[in-house]
Amino acid sequence: MQFKSMVLSNLEVSPGYFRMRMTAPPAVIGATPGQFVMVRINDSIDPLLRRPFGIFDLGTFDTEFTDCGRQSYLEILFRVVGKGTAMLSRFHRGDHLDILAPLGKGFIPGDPSGEKILVGGGIGLAPLYFLAKELVKSGKVRLFAGGRSKEDILCITEFERLGVETYVATDDGTLGENGLVTEVMERRLEGRSGDRTIFACGPHPMLRAVATIAQRLQVPCQVSMEAYMACGVGACLGCVMKGCNHTESTPDYRCVCKDGPVFDSLELQWD
Amino acid sequence: MNRPDLSVELAGIRLRNPVMTASGTFGYGREFADYLDLSAIGAFITKGLSLRPKAGNPTPRIVETTGGMLNAIGLQNVGIDAFVAEKLPFLRTVDTPAIVNLYGNTLDEYGELAERLDRLPEVAGIEVNISCPNVKQGGIVFGTDPAAAREVVDLVRKSTIKPLIVKLSPNVTDVVVMARACADAGADALSLINTLTGMAIDLDRRRPVLANVTGGLSGPAIKPVALRMVWQVAKAVQLPIIGIGGIMTGRDALEFMLAGATAVQVGTANFLDPSAAGRIAREMEQYLTEHGVDDVKELIGALRA
Ligand SMILES: Cc1cc2nc3c(=O)[nH]c(=O)nc-3n(C[C@H](O)[C@H](O)[C@H](O)COP(=O)(O)OP(=O)(O)OC[C@H]3O[C@@H](n4cnc5c(N)ncnc54)[C@H](O)[C@@H]3O)c2cc1C
Ligand SMILES: Cc1cc2nc3c(=O)[nH]c(=O)nc-3n(C[C@H](O)[C@H](O)[C@H](O)COP(=O)(O)O)c2cc1C
Ligand code: FES
């Protein structure tokens, strides 16, 4: 759905990372973790296209401003990387945005009794928080969070407050283990069995590594992908990725915006 | 006061208003049904269709540029069989004309596609995209060679009795020459412009941004070029014209009509605002009301120049 949203807060949670809360219509509360929003940053043509962001959190709070006394909100967690996100970082309470949400297909929680393993790289933690909130309701959740430096490990205390067991790795060793988060995860998974599912979001090389490990250990794995997007609704075919059956003569392209952004890792070609 | 009349007729297709959506920016209509009442627009054009499914280009396929965007989708589409099986049923459910945009990799493919579409009652008209290479003749683009364009249009004309719109490429020295060739070969209407070839470079990586290196520029950045071409063609050719290029507002659309367009297509704007086409039609109506114009047809070619 398309709606006008009002910014409620926009906080810099770590240098260059912002957590923005904004109003949303009640129907958006039905979104599933892993789904995303497309934000139109202003009414002019600069930036021209909407920018996609995962849903970090959503909920309702008490207010006297609506008929039913509850106001729904959604939150995004974003990193300033270019023009659009820089503009977004300067939004204040009371500013307005035009939003399309919820979009795409989210994570499938799977068997509630199994162990849930979340793997996030940098800003890839964003959609995993909303997912963790749902998953802790039914069972054990472990989070493997990786980043370049300690500034890139976001909102870890929020995850811990949910009761998630967290493991951290940084490239420079400023927080947690020194090294790649995928290596830490692999060590933790190795030699153990049981019903487990991996949920991952982060940079492409990290996701490829996670998919490879998952396949080797035969653990079901869902990955949330990123791509340049224009429409967000499956119309422009700008955001596609190769599906597992893809060949030149029998194309199997999947739209990240419509068929994803969450895919079973076996559905994709990882070249 | 009476509401202004926004209806126009185009190549025998009656449009409730002059706003259509451009091929490749509106999927098969259904993708936008949650955001836009399809009965609020004049017509919609479906994604470029080919005989066989087409994989399209490697990614990245799109990038934003100043005031516009580049795309190198590579005409990815499901092919006619899947189109008939999966996309056609939806077209039956809307009371807005659906025009099918098609292209071929060879001359024969254009003819065969047109013949097959001719039999489908859901298809209100055909828009022929000639901005693609002829793989049988060293990749020369049909739409940049008047003789090749004439051949394509002539063959499609013989293959269908449906309203025939030819979509012109702006990547030519003289668009009027191309327009005349298509008119002579039996087109009922001309739509222009398709995207302008461009490129974007990532300075730090010293690489082109798009995997295909070059792509088609669309959006507000191309509007002045599109207006100029519509104006030139309208003066030279008697056929009705559909103006396309960077239309974001009702005012933009009306400028194209002044330049000589009977109708317009909205493309990139659908991405920023999935309800854009409906809003643009409303803005046109509002402008006419405010300026005491009873009938939008009064503005077609009414430029004082
Ligand atoms: C489904 C999805 C969910 C996302 N969720 C989040 C999120 O929760 N938090 C967050 O911070 N970011 C997220 N992103 C990435 C975010 O959309 C881009 O960082 C943003 O669009 C950059 O905009 P910009 O104008 O600041 O940068 P630009 O000036 O446009 O570009 C700057 C750089 O950003 C990169 N970039 C631009 N657009 C995209 C894009 N669509 N996807 C990936 N990289 C891009 C380019 O590589 C470029 O080098 C998500 C992307 C997708 C596809
Ligand atoms: C992502 C994208 C895909 C397109 N695909 C097609 C296509 O399949 N066939 C075609 O004739 N034109 C295609 N076009 C061109 C548009 O129909 C239109 O002519 C062009 O974008 C200019 O209009 P605009 O500035 O309003 O977008 C495409 C444009 C874009 C941006
Ligand atoms: S962003 Fe347009 S199809 Fe996915």
Image: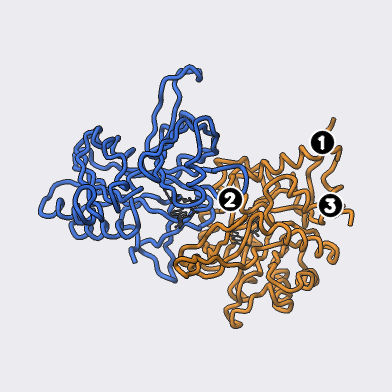
Chain colours: A blue, B orange
Asked if both marks, 2 and 3, belong to the same chain, the answer given is no
Q: Is residue A48 above or below residue B229?
A: above
The reply to whether dot 3 and dot 1 touch (C-beta < 8 Å) is no
Residue type of the residue flagged with mark 1: Glu
Looking at the image, do the residues carrying marks 2 and 1 touch, with CB atoms under 8 Å apart?
no
Q: Is residue B212 above or below residue A131?
A: below
Q: Amino acid at mark 2?
A: Leu
Measure the C-alpha gap from mark 3 to mark 1. 18 Å
Residue B58 against residue B267 in the figure, above or below: below
Q: Secondary structure at mark 2?
A: loop
Residue B185 picture location, percent across and down: 77, 72
Chain at tag 2: A
Quadrant including the C terminus of chain A: bottom left
Q: Badge 3 is on which residue?
A: B300
Picture disc at residue A48? 2
Outermost residue toward the left in this view: A191
Badge 1 density bin: few <14, some 14–19, many ≥20, Cα 10 Å? few
Q: Residue at x 13, y 47 (%)?
A: A194
Res. A244 visible in picture: yes
The local secondary structure at tag 3 comes to loop
> The numbered mark 1 sits on a residue in which chain?
B
* Residues marked 2 and 1, same chain: no
What residue is pinned by disc 1?
Answer: B290
Instruction: State which tag comes first along the sequence, 3 or 1.
Output: 1
Depth check, front residue: A175 or A234: A175
